[in-house]
Amino acid sequence: MGTYLICLAVALIGGLMLSRLTKKVNLPAVTAYLVAGLCLGPFLLGRLRIPGFGFSTLEQVDSLRIVTQTALGFIAFTIGNEFRLAQLKATGAKAIIVGILQAVIATAVVDVVLVLLHVIAPGVISIPCAITLGAIASATAPAATLMVVRQYKADGPLTRLLLLVVAIDDAVGLVLFSVSFGIATALSSGHVSILAVVIEPIVEIILSLGLGSVMGWLLNWVEQFFHSRSKRMTISVAFVLLTVGLSMVEFRVGPVHCGFSLLLVCMMTGTIFCNICSTSEELMSRVDGWTMPLNVLFFVISGAELDLNVLIQPVTILVGVLYIAARSAGKYYGAMLSCHLTSQPKPICDHLGITLLPQAGVALGMALTAASLPDGNLARNVVLFGVLVYELVGPTLTKRSLLAVGDIKPEGRTSARKENAPRA
């Protein structure tokens, strides 16, 4: 236990110290945290096997999954705060159209490119693996996006649309992956399961939205028994932890496997809470401050999880490069087309797709499921390679796009040290 505490402390300190260096070259702090994790991971400093100084094995990193899952829950809860009724009335329908279209187009583009690769070189990738990777391509990482928005205090039309689209993207990606994986399994085994392809994804979404709604209502009800700001913040944190825990429960009803999407549950909790609680904005800001160390750990641990072994596999590199190129094109042009269809301003049409490139936890979870296919290891390794590239490059591209449209003000960041200095 002592070794784990030292590891977490080193991860926090290392990530924060490296962020001072990346600030000098105008890179987002998220990139520093990921690089710090990569350095502390089992392929670099972790190889030294010094207790507490880095993560010596991927199993040790995986044992900290409770930290990353909890952080992801708080991130989703915060994103749910963006779904306020006033904003939904103004941009909700357009955000839904953009969220669905860009995900579907990205999936279609990756499907076409990888299926063509199969036609040209059947021994490199199978059809089931190709269509599964296409579905995984739809997923966008909300965590990196939110951290960039927070760090630079981004606000504006693109930022507001981006947060809504990223939230919708999870539900769309879940459906696309379930359908594609069901088809891939059928092609591999010769047996089509309507249960896995259609019913279970719908059940998961309905259960997630239902649980999230109940938790959001309960949080608002319990909050009313407390008047102290610190106690109300504490109960908010407790409810998010409870929601994360409940979202991990799985059960069966007859032949139907039932589970929850952590992101959807926590997003819905935040959405319901922010729309029925009159003091939700003040509480959300206090919870955000409390969770900052947790978010830093999330990205450092995510960086440590990146498996550098994929960089020495020629087939993975080949398919990975095609996957990244096709997904990037699909996200960019899919977002551009859907923005044009919904009459978005030109700056948003030109830059939204770039901000949707980051990919991490959700995609890795899908890849873990895809590993059960005959060549599922290839799918997993390709996604790992994609995450390695997207997580290191994506936050910087997101920052530049938000800066280009004016949602980030160059002078937006201030020094708390200077603000709190005593005045003469």
Image: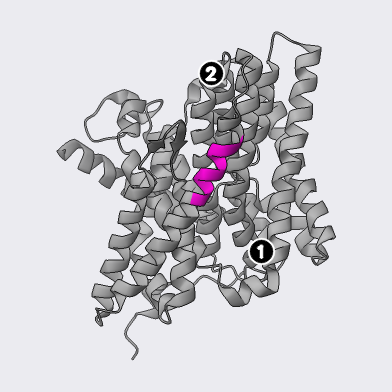
Nearest the viewer among 346 and 256 is 256
Is disc 1 placed on a helix, strand or loop?
helix
Using the image, determine if residue 46 lies above or below residue 333: above
| Residue 34, visible in the rendered structure | yes
Which corner quadrant holds the N terminus?
top left
Q: Quadrant of residue 90?
A: bottom right
Left/right placement of residue 73 relative to residue 342 reads: left
Q: Residue furthest bottom?
A: 424
Q: Quadrant of residue 4?
A: top left
Q: Are marks 2 and 1 in contact (CB under 8 Å)?
A: no
Q: Residue furthest left?
A: 2
Percent position of residue 361, x then y: 49, 40
Percent position of residue 98, x then y: 73, 56
Q: Residue furthest front?
A: 254
Is disc 2 placed on a helix, strand or loop?
helix
Task: Indicate which disc, 2 or 1, sits on the residue closer to the N terminus.
Answer: 1
Residue 75 within the magenta-colored segment of the rendering: no
Nearest the viewer among 395 and 76 is 76
Percent position of residue 220, x then y: 36, 73
Region of the chain picked out in magenta, as a range: 198-206
Residue at 46% of width from left, 43% of height from top?
A: 34
Residue at 59% of width from left, 60% of height from top?
A: 163
User: Mark 1 sits on what residue?
Assistant: 161
Which corner quadrant holds the C terminus?
bottom left
Residue 200 within the magenta-colored segment of the rendering: yes
Residue at 31% of width from left, 38% of height from top?
A: 64
User: Mark 2 sits on what residue?
Assistant: 377
Residue flagged by tag 2: what amino acid is it? Asn
Using the image, determine if residue 229 lies above or below residue 50: below
Residue at 66% of width from left, 64% of height from top?
A: 161
Residue flagged by tag 1: what amino acid is it? Leu
Which circle marks residue 40 in the picture? none
